[in-house]
Image (cartoon, coloured by chain):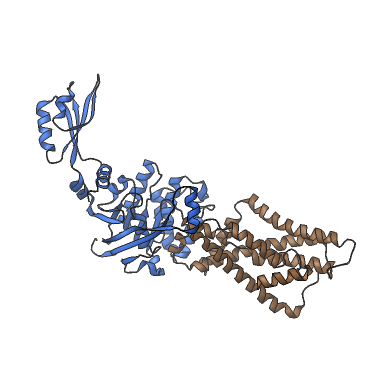
Amino acid sequence: MFQQPIIKVQNLKRHFKVYKKQPGLMGSIKSLFKRKYETVKAVDDISFEIKQGEIVGFIGQNGAGKTTTLKVLSGLLYPTAGAVSVLGFNPWDRKSKFQKQFALVMGQKNQLWWDLPAMETFLLNKAIYEVPDEQFEKTLNKLVDLLKVSEILNIQVRKLSLGQRMKCELIAALLHNPKVLFLDEPTIGLDVVMQKNLRDFIKAYNKEFKATVILTSHYMNDVKELCERAIVIDKGKLIFDGKLQDIINKYARNKILSLVFSKEVVKKDLKKFGEIKEFSQDNSSYTATILVSRKKAALVASDLLKELPIEDLNIEEPPIEAIIREVFQSGNV
Amino acid sequence: MYKYWLIAQLFWQDSLVYRASFLMWRLRSFTSTLISLSVWSAIYQHQSQVFNYSQPAMLSYIFLTAILHSLILSTSLHSLANEIYSGQISFNLLKPINFMGMLISQELADKAINIIFAIGEINLLYLIFKPSFILPPSNTILIFIFWVALGIIIHFIINLLFGTIGFWSPDSWGPKFLFFMLIEFTAGKLYPLDILPQIIQKIISKVVI
């Protein structure tokens, strides 16, 4: 496992020409005669390799180039420049042999026939992907069990909840047991319980079928739980490729100390230890949260225990969301 | 081939989901032919020849154009522009299936459902009007079938072209509507074109050719 790179991307560029409209009615009238265009570098010279069985998280702000990259990898978009190979194929050749080995799931679009039960789409996909009867039965039963959707297979898709629909979307995409799975925000709009269910399912699918998964998501919990490796893209450029923990080590400057005091303390006594984020002193509880430099966290904790009436103390990493936000905001790349 | 057959079956299932919409669609088609037949029947009440056409010839013409309309002008490509614009088309492009084959199977399924119901409706209209039919001469039947087949292919290609509007705009309905109004008129859907004044016939033949 994790030996052979099956996705290779070298110096990939994908640029779009977009029309820039001037504001107001006059802008609209002017645009009838003359238009200004701007080149948007959706993906700008990125390179990476992904090995079989890996789950890789694509992290980036809206418009960073995540979905464009997935579209190029799945053969929907031609690259402006660069070389891409997925499972040894040029994706944009759109060969049947290649298309039978991967699936793309887009959280904001659906491939299921809207007015028909999901089962009809499953049967159509079985025919399209030429899945043998026995394999179809086996895979369908397994996926239906894993996602607990046996009750809804014969209900019209439009009558399903978003979560139920997303589960059926995943089944439709996985019936041919793809070796590579591109998931573009698969948990968008779902409640936390459903998000967790889908994450568990993706993990189980990856384990069972040794599938390579590329996942984009705005929910950092998805990336945290599923991906050991993360690729961070900003404005089309790859700014980080490595273990998720390395992002924390590289970019998180502080640690969070959560304190519970046994009796009342004065705020100014706490100030010298670090930046106070929360301070609460009411009748029954005395708590505070402070930010301290990562390097000094252990030392500060020790000093706090010595100098203040500490009942409980926790040292935590800042949430990954906050670290990523800081990376993007500071341009610290 | 089985996958294309399955696509046609799903298309039929999909067409029959909304009963009210389906009934309205058929009612519109039925009413259009009913009105034409009623108007021409009224015109022939007190005369046996109008524009050199006898009543049986004119009513046969209306019946035949109703069948040809269902066969040639029906299409499943109305939503193509919107599918392109919204990106929904992506899923079909990602699958190991010939995209054009898929469109053709849907188109044929649409024509099949149209013609089946049109024949039923025409039988009903026949019972109401009880016309005596004058069929086209049998020695031209092969060339007639050939022209109909060409009409189907040309109409399919024109609709594909309208679908490509989706690369710029989701709404292809306006230009399509105008175009098909002209098609219905210039193809003689409403009445035989040779009843029009010579000058208009000349303009139509110049514009169309």
Q: Nearer the viewer, residue A237 or A112?
A: A237
| B35 relative to A76 in the view: left or right | right
Q: Position of residue B28 (x, y in %)?
A: 70, 55
**Residue pushed farthest right?**
B46
Q: Is residue B162 visible?
A: yes
Q: Is residue A86 visible?
A: no
Query: Left or right of A288: which side holds A157?
Result: right
Camera-nearest residue between A329 and B42: A329
Measured as percent of width and height from the top left, residue B139 is found at 75, 81
Q: How many numbered marks does the figure carry? A: 0
**Residue drawn 20% across the image and 50% down it:** A246
In the displayed structure image, the side of residue A235 where residue B199 appears, left or right:
right
Q: In the image, is residue A308 above or below residue B142?
A: above
The one of B141 and A59 positioned closer to us in this rendering: A59
Q: Which chain is brown?
A: B
Chain represented in blue: A
Picture coordinates of residue B53 (x, y %)?
83, 69
What residue lies at 42% left-to-right and 52% top-to-bottom?
A144
| Quadrant of the image occupied by residue A81 | bottom left
| Snapshot quadrant of residue B117 | bottom right
For this orientation, the residue located farthest to the bottom is B139
Residue A272 appears at what percent x and percent y?
13, 30
Say which quadrant the N terminus of chain A sits in: bottom left
